[in-house]
Image (tube, grey):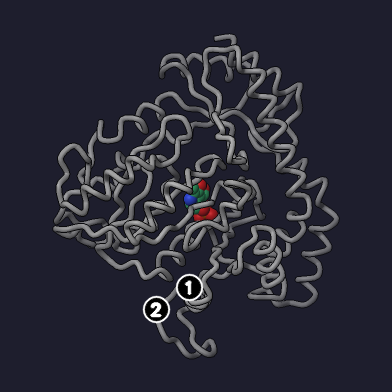
Amino acid sequence: MNIPFIDLKSQYEIVKGQVQDNIDAVLKHGAYVMGPEIGELEKSLADYCGQKHALACSSGTDALLLALLSLEIKPGDAVLTTPFTFFATAEAIAFMGAVPVFVDIDPETFNISPEGLERTIAALKENNSSGIPLPSSGALSDLGHKVPEKLIPKAIISVDLFGLPCEYDLIEEIARKHDLKLIVDAAQSFGATYHGKSTCAIGHAACTSFFPAKPLGCYGDGGMCFTNDADIYSLMQSLRVHGQGRDRYENVRLGMNARMDTLQAAILLAKIKIFPRELEMRQKAAENYNSLLSSGNIVTPSIPDNMKSAWAQYSILAQDSEHRDAIFQKLKENNVPWAVYYVLPLHLQKSFAYLGYSQGDFPQCEEISRKIFSLPMHPYLEAEAQGKIARTVLSV
Ligand SMILES: Cc1ncc(COP(=O)(O)O)c(C=O)c1O
């Protein structure tokens, strides 16, 4: 039995006809850049998420940059986020010259801890780091941006890790109370809901990724920004195309070339048709894993009642790193693929050494990174394969 980690081939068999028709249409009309499919996709996904504006762009990383730029985050501003995420979340902050300020995670959901967020904001405001790890002032990033003496919190980037929404009632309240912008990094959570609301309809702006392995993936790089604010949206539109004004030869600000290819929009238009069904299939696969693994010595994901995960990954915890290594050995012997998200938390990455964080600063995140691993997860995962995977994991 060959078990892929993610099965894009089975999906392609289902969408092939529509994908090929849509690609053909683009090749015929020839508007490869900002063709009509871009607007069609934006409308379709804004409606799907119940959000006013959607802006297609070149990747999830560029979506984060567009959100930070349009919310007018400036060099030296402090942006609070989780150290337990894909590199791009904090990279986008630092790339702007702003300063990533990490906050430890909740060990059950793996998402940013709202209590930790409150404590870190208080420490920043009082400029008092006693007991709360904060970036060291004066240091320079690779790009020559300096961490200022006094860090002023300006924004939060929350990340819905593995597809599970953060605790948004609490996070939105904190953002309101401290007058912070909230950017939802929904790169892994397109399709997830919090109290029935799409994660892409939360915050001042939300960003997602259509990287092929994401719950809704294209056949290359792609991303999207969402907002309900017409001014932010209008800034995003300008920033996406070199800060353009009334036309493409009037440049009223510095921007990016962050457009999505028309071909990727055409592919996504085909895939969105089967996406709701695929989400249900992911949910079923996750429930099946939960029941197969419930009797074992591993910890299965806990999903709060008010949330629906998009199940970008199915991630579980071993007892400790030795237990995890022994499971990996068995998975290898049985030809079962796995992955570890994330081996090295961001505060311990070389590129963020200038922030001055050290081992032990975020104990929950560090402990989870030693125990966590992800099993194959996709809508076309069969019960038989899940049985084999679960037996292998539980045999250790
Ligand atoms: C949490 C998170 N943020 C941002 C990104 C960046 O998205 P992209 O790869 O489309 O640039 C990813 C992609 O893996 C991600 O998982």
Distance between the Cα atoms at labels 2 and 1? 16 Å
Asked if residue 303 is positioned above or below residue 350 in the image, the reply reads above
Q: Amino acid at mark 1?
A: Ile
Q: Nearer the viewer, mark 2 or mark 1?
A: 1
User: 10 Å neighbourhood of mark 1: few (<14), some, or many (≥20)?
Assistant: many
Q: Is residue 380 left or right of residue 355?
A: right
Asked if the residue at label 1 sits under 8 Å from ligand 1, the reply is no
Residue at 48 percent across and 19 percent down: it is: 318
Element marked by disc 2? loop
Vertical arrangement, residue 377 with respect to residue 43, above or below: above
**Left or right, residue 102 beside residue 236:** left
- Front residue of this view, candidates 257 and 208: 208
Residue at which label 1 appears: 232
Residue 362, which numbered label?
A: none
Q: Is residue 148 above or below residue 26?
A: above
Crowd band around label 2 with a 10 angstrom C-alpha radius: few (<14), some (14–19), many (20+): few
Residue at screen point 54% across, 29% down? 302
Q: Is residue 263 visible?
A: no
- SS type, badge 1: helix
Left/right of residue 24 with respect to residue 7 in the rendered view: right
Residue 266, x across and y down, in percent: 73, 64
Residue designated by label 2: 254
Quadrant that contains the N terminus? top right
Residue type (three-letter) at the residue carrying disc 2: Leu
